[in-house]
Image (cartoon, helix red, strand yellow):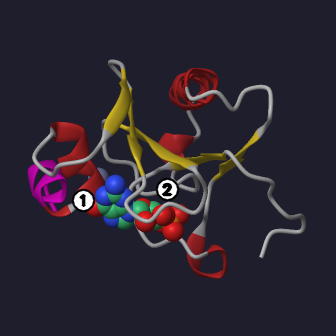
Amino acid sequence: MSEAETAQRCPFCRIAAGTLPSEQIYHDETVVGFRDLNPQAPLHVLVIPRRHVRGINAPEAEDGALLAAMVRAANQIAREQGVAESGYRLVWNVGPDAGQSVFHLHLHVLGGRQFGWPPG
Ligand code: 5GP
Ligand code: ZN
């Protein structure tokens, strides 16, 4: 599949491009942060790279600059949304056992309630 075809089919490529509506609360030149459609906590934001990467286990994800941009965005979102002090959880789901359902790299930023450990 060409890059253009991937971008047309992938929902998160479309969100990054603005052709699929989302509630974006963060963006910079590398990543976008938007509210999850089916929130699992009072704060549930997904941070994605603008370029298509299929998951954290893809070779392109093992890039220091990209990972730093994602973590920086997640931490800034947590501060801006008021959960930096109360705490928050950052999650990368990888593959079937973890329930990954969208194959465009995304970092979950969850906050605003207490989370159990071990995770369900
Ligand atoms: P995963 O299970 O792959 O780690 O997480 C995918 C997440 O994307 C889910 O929490 C799901 O609710 C969210 N999601 C899927 N499609 C859309 C969409 O079109 N818009 C938004 N805002 N979130 C989506
Ligand atoms: Zn994509």
- Label 1 packing within 10 angstroms: few (<14), some (14-19), many (20+): some
Question: Which sits in the foreground, 47 or 88?
Answer: 88
Provide the residue designation for mark 1: 11
Question: Which sits in the foreground, 55 or 110?
Answer: 110
In this rendering, would 16 be left or right of 83? left
Q: Residue at x 53, y 25 (%)?
A: 73
Task: Tell me the CA gap for discs 1 and 2.
Answer: 14 Å
Q: Is residue 115 above or below residue 49?
A: below
Question: Which sits in the foreground, 63 or 14?
Answer: 14
- Dot 1 lies on which element? helix
Q: Position of residue 107 (x, y in %)?
A: 55, 47
Which amino acid does the dot numbered 2 rest on? Answer: Gly
Question: Mainly helix, strand or loop, the magenta region?
Answer: helix
Q: Is mark 1 within 8 Å of ligand 1?
A: yes
Q: Residue at x 32, y 18 (%)?
A: 29
Q: Residue at x 47, y 42 (%)?
A: 60
Q: Nearer the viewer, mark 1 or mark 2?
A: 1
Q: Is mark 2 within 8 Å of ligand 1?
A: no
Quadrant (top left, top right, bottom left, bottom right) of the C terminus: bottom right
Q: In the figure, residue 40 lies in which quadrant?
A: bottom right
- Dot 2 lies on which element? loop
Which region of the structure is painted magenta?
A: 1-8
Q: Is residue 64 above or below residue 17?
A: above
Which amino acid does the dot numbered 1 rest on? Answer: Pro
Numbered circle sitting on residue 55: 2
